[in-house]
Amino acid sequence: MKKLSGLLTVLVLLLLQVGGAFAQSSDYEIIDSFKKRHQSLLASIKAVQDLGQRDLLANEIDRLEGEYGQHRKLLGEGLYPESFEASIGRLRDQLNQSTARLHLAEESKNDKLQIVEKTRKIEAQESTIKVISTQNEEYRAALEKLSRDVQEQSARIEQLTAENTGLLEKIKALQLESRKDKESIAKLRELTDKLYANIRDREELIVKMMDSLFDEYSKADLTDAQKKNILAIAQKNDYVSKIVTTIDGNINYVGTALLTPQDVNVIRDQQKRLALKWDGIKPFVSKLYPDDQSRTRDITMVDGRLADLKSGTGEATWRSIQQVFTTNGIALAPFRNAGEFSTLVLAYVDAQLKEPSREKYQVFKHKVWDSPIKDQWLPVIPLEELTVKQRADLEDRIALWDKKISAALWRWVLIGGFAAAMLALVVVMVGRKKKPTLPA
Amino acid sequence: MRKAALVCSLAILALSGCATVTLKPVDFSWSYESVLTADSAGYVRAEPKTIAFNAGELFRAEMKDPGAAAGTIVRIIRDYEGYYFITAPGFRHVYIFTGAKGELTLKKKVLIAEQGMEKPFFNRRDLGVELVANGQAYLLSRKGIVSGEKK
């Protein structure tokens, strides 16, 4: 608005200037018009709003001086006590003052802009600080909860570990007795089930602890200090040691347990899950160590333990399969893999082929082989371990045993039939001899 | 030194003994005209005050109506000798007065235009008073038009 009024003033001045022709003028009018233009110009100079207007007004002063210079003497009298030069000089002084004012205003405007900008930045920073403070509060609360949870989980893990130690001792004592009776096996089974349940609970807790720490650590907006806090919690709760203990617990369990085929599936799934989880948290775990040596040592140790768990699960599977044979009175030498299993079973069947026993065949066929070995256990054994050929060989050999048993049966049937026929013949013949002695 | 002191003393004695003192030459001229607006009573005056008088008689003479003065501009200038030149838009004449003892006494009435003047104005010039009216410039003295032709 001010700019507009300033511009209008300049335009008015230009219009006044148009009227400043002095072909035949009244001296009075010359003086009067000069005074008016001077006054108007002075007001415009005082009100000038920008350097563009200032330049126009400077030109206007020059123009005024040029137009009225010829009336210098007259104007000297008309403007007395001020001279024409002094009057023009006054305009220029005022213009200089206004220019200085404009520069000051410009600086002030820049300062104001800077102040506004800085104020805006400060406000934005305050807002950010507020958000960060809120986040920090939330983070602090989350961290406290995490710390509490981890401590609780840690305590529960310790408790389960102690329980498991007791259970393992009992299982080992029972195994040392080498009792193969059903009652002992049932007791062993009960203890190992309890141990396994405890191990699973502990494993769940460990995975939960891993998840909670790792998830919190993986949040994108955490600062380095916040991450350090989480690492401190992990270190304080002996994170890696608990992972190792859990895997060791599993290894011990599969080293002593008698598994069902369902157990094998579950254990394998858990083992895979644990291995995957471990791969996921390795980068996080790496940060817990201050030096490379201990980091490499512990990570290699966990990797090794996981490999042991995998092989231990395989051994436990074969041991449990052997237990099926043992429980049904079939004595096989211990086997720990598919090759040994195949060889020993074939050897057993071959031995039976030499002296086929229908009773042994029935037990082997119906209580061991068809179920649970063939329908439950063999499906959980990978084909890479027990090959198709090995399976076919076993089936063929058992089929041969079946034929032998069947042949023996038919033989006995034929013998029985022949004996019955002979007996019937004897009875008929005896009956005929007695017939003539009968009275007519 | 003594001579100078004696001359000064004689001069002081001579002056104190005179009855009248005449200062001359005197330039009574105004640098430029006064443009005054008559009030409802026909009086013209201005601030700073130059001269104030009732112009009603002039309007009576020019227009037969002294009331016509009200609100009308009257232009006045004084020449070197102290004569007042007065006119106004619509006047046919320039009136030349002498002023003394609270009066303006008409010395000359100069006919400029029978049809009356449009936008007349005065300027002081070295040789007299310039009147510009109806696009024509006239040089005036207390005796009338010095140059320029009346229409």
Image (cartoon, grey):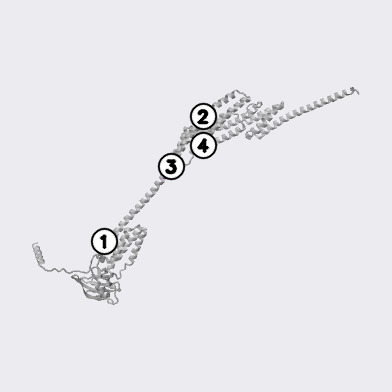
Percent x, y for residue A388? Answer: 66, 35
* Residue picked out by circle 4: A211
The answer for which chain carries disc 4 is A
Write down the region rendered in magenta.
A127-133
Looking at the rendered structure, the secondary structure element under dot 2 is helix
Mark 2 on the same chain as mark 4? yes
Label for residue A387? none
Decide whether the magenta segment is chiefly helix, strand or loop. Answer: helix
Does the magenta portion include A423?
A: no
> Which of disc 4 and disc 2 is earlier in sequence?
2
Q: Can residue B92 be seen in this view?
A: no
A199 to the left or right of B80 = right
> Which of disc 3 and disc 1 is earlier in sequence?
1
Which sits in the foreground, A41 or B147? A41
Tell me whether the residue at label 2 lies in contact with that at label 3, contact meaning CB atoms closer than 8 angstroms. no
**Distance Cα–Cα, label 2 vs label 4:** 20 Å
Q: Residue at x 47, y 36 (%)?
A: A145
B66 to the left or right of A213 = left
Q: What residue type is labelled 2?
A: Gln
Looking at the rendered structure, the secondary structure element under dot 4 is helix
Percent x, y for residue A32? Answer: 28, 66
The answer for which chain carries disc 2 is A
Label 1 crowd (10 A; few <14 / some 14-19 / many >=20): some
* Residue picked out by circle 3: A132
Percent x, y for residue B33? Answer: 25, 69
Q: Can residue A388 be seen in this view?
A: yes
Which sits in the foreground, A117 or A99? A117
**Distance Cα–Cα, label 2 vs label 3:** 39 Å
* Of labels 1 and 3, the one closer to you: 3
* Residue picked out by circle 1: A86
